[in-house]
Image (tube, rainbow, N blue to C red):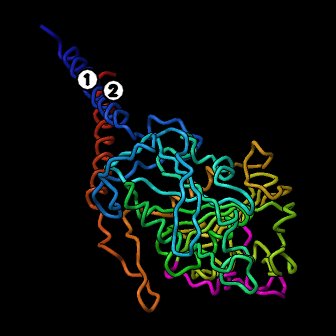
Amino acid sequence: MASPLFRLQSLGALCLALALTAFAAKSESSTSTTSSASSIATHLNFVVPEPISAPGVNTSSGCGKKLESDYEPGGDAAGPFTFDTTDGYGRKYTIHIPKYYDINRASPLIFAFPGNTNTYKAIEDQTGLSDESMNPYAIAVYVSGVNLGFVSNPGYGATKDATFPKVDDITFMEDFIEDLQDKFCIDTGRIWAVGHSNGGGLVNVMACDPTLSTKITAFAANSGAFYTNFTDGDPKTIDTGTTTQGDCLPARERIPFIEFHGTDDDVVEYEGADDHSSYGIRVLPDIQHWASSWAVRDGYSIDNVTSRPDDDVKVYQWGAPDNLGIVTHYRLNGWVHDYARKSAGAPIDATPIIMEFFYNQTNYTTTTSTTTATGTPTPTSPASASSTSSAAAGKLAESHIVSIVAGLALTWML
């Protein structure tokens, strides 16, 4: 007959086996899905949340639609394609569909815009957003501008003596976003934009726009050319509330914006310039002044928290204690006019930082907004994601139960 001690040890072993089985089952279930973050090796320093199930809050009309044959998940960027809009110009673009794309899960959407005279291919190479290790879940769209420029450039759009006065990148983007949302399963609460130089300037113009500021939820720029509409003034004090396309009037507060800029940038100078642009003189603001102006526009003070993660990197963060960094600027000592990446000689890789910023600053449980006649953002649907929250809570509780059972098992065995 077994002794009480033996029975206790057996019970402990059984409990431990059950705990390990539960843990294994939990691990298997988390890695067996086609989009499991735990099965993806990334260069990111955070756990990338899986795309949300559709239909649901912030899922587009394209959810459930079969992927067209032009697109191969995880393959090379498809295209180039041309998107025509009401200004009479077609824009060329390519699209990268992530390996784990699922027509029943809403993917984030990232737009990437190159610098002046550069193409969609240049910004794809610079950002690395077609690399699974940088971007496992988001659809990436790389866009070339009209004559390889954008309306953030003084020579385009509604500016005095513009070379391309009819170019309307704002309406183009409104139409383009709507078209993509109808074709693909997109998380409309996680539509992001990143750009380099002139493309970064376009990102700024879109963040200032009453409509696009409610459709795009977070913004990023490298070596951003943030032209004001002034022809004279001090770059350190110039009013940044005007862009080349008019006043900066975002239709919502709390616009998340991150920017990277090198101190040795001789194209878009870090300290700004009052005599810049071959298309007509416009003042470029001092970069720290531009960033602090965004903090004020978001409702915060110019006070910031400064850190130095590296000898050549200084980080400025604005915001409140509960969202410090909603406006963030990276000052890169000695870096030039290029998208920041170590392979090109920069002290940091910008893309992993941008991806973490995008995810941290946007939440699928918060609905996107539309603009009222008064410019006040109005929710398009109730901000409810109880099923998602419950699922997350269930996983957390499950892990606690496994830990408790395992702990008891070890106690009984020892």
Instruction: Name the chief secondary structure element in magenta.
Output: loop
Q: Position of residue 395 (x, y in %)?
A: 31, 45
Instruction: Identify which residue is drawn at 34% across, 37% down.
Output: 33
Q: Secondary structure at mark 1?
A: helix
Give the CA separation, mark 2 to mark 1: 7 Å
The residue that mark 2 highlights is 410
Can you say which quadrant of the picture contains the N terminus? top left
The magenta segment: 224-253
Which callout, 2 or 1, points at the residue further toward the start of the chain?
Answer: 1
Q: Residues within 10 Å of mark 2 (few under 14, many from 20)?
A: some
Q: Are marks 2 and 1 in contact (CB under 8 Å)?
A: yes
Residue type at the position of mark 2: Leu
Q: Position of residue 380 (x, y in %)?
A: 34, 75
| Residue that lies at the very extreme toward the left in this rendered image | 1
Considering only vertical position in the picture, is 63 above or below 176?
above
330 on left or right of 215 = right
Give 75 or 2, whichever is nearer the viewer.
75
Can you say which quadrant of the picture contains the C terminus? top left
Q: Position of residue 69 (x, y in %)?
A: 41, 43
Q: Position of residue 87 (x, y in %)?
A: 56, 75
Residue type at the position of mark 1: Gly
The question of residue 302 being in magenta is answered with no
Instruction: Identify which residue is drawn at 21% across, 22% down.
Output: 11
Query: Looking at the image, can residue 393 be seen?
Result: no
Instruction: Identify which residue is drawn at 64% across, 86% down.
Output: 246
Q: Residues within 10 Å of mark 1 (few under 14, many from 20)?
A: many
The residue that mark 1 highlights is 12
